[in-house]
Amino acid sequence: MPSSAVRNLIERPSFGPEQRHRLKVELAQLLQPGLSTLLGSALGLAARFLEGNAQEAELREARQDIWAHVTGLACGVTQSDSSAAHIVLACLETRPESHSQQSLLEEVDRLSNLGVSEAELSQALLRRS
């Protein structure tokens, strides 16, 4: 569970769905060096979407590719792989209701479980403040 300092940064009323979506992508990029090519490409696509340089249909296709990849691994998927895929999948969601404070808190929790430090999370959150 995120610390109270990180939680306070996330729960700012000024963060609307679009800001939280951008923040999810920025936070997920903290995993970038260790992401598979598929997840890294999908994350880049999410960032391009937020800048107006990708279409919703492309994100839908990327989500399908990730699900196909993860389910194809079946028993061979690790908890880390599953968590990283879930984090990137959340970044590919385009509906505003997919980017609630609760979903952002869940992403931060997953990132913490994957070894992203409190300091890295705080820095990313402060950059968006």
Image: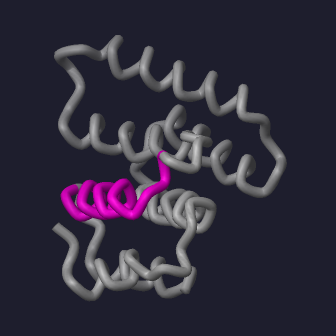
2 lies left or right of 63:
left
Residue located at (39% from left, 60% from top): 104
| Position above or below: 102 against 41 | below
Q: Quadrant of residue 118?
A: bottom left
How many callouts does the rendering have? 0
Question: Which x, y percent locates residue 59?
Answer: 64, 33
Question: Which x, y percent locates residue 102?
Answer: 33, 59
59 lies left or right of 105:
right
81 lies left or right of 60:
left
Residue located at (22% from left, 72% from top): 2
Residue located at (55% from left, 86% from top): 129
| Position above or below: 106 against 53 | below
Residue located at (73% from left, 47% from top): 49
- Which residues make up the magenta segment? 98-113
| Position above or below: 106 against 121 | above
Residue 53 lies in magenta, yes or no? no
Which residue is at the front of the view, 37 or 127?
Answer: 127
Classify the position of the N terminus by image quarter.
bottom left
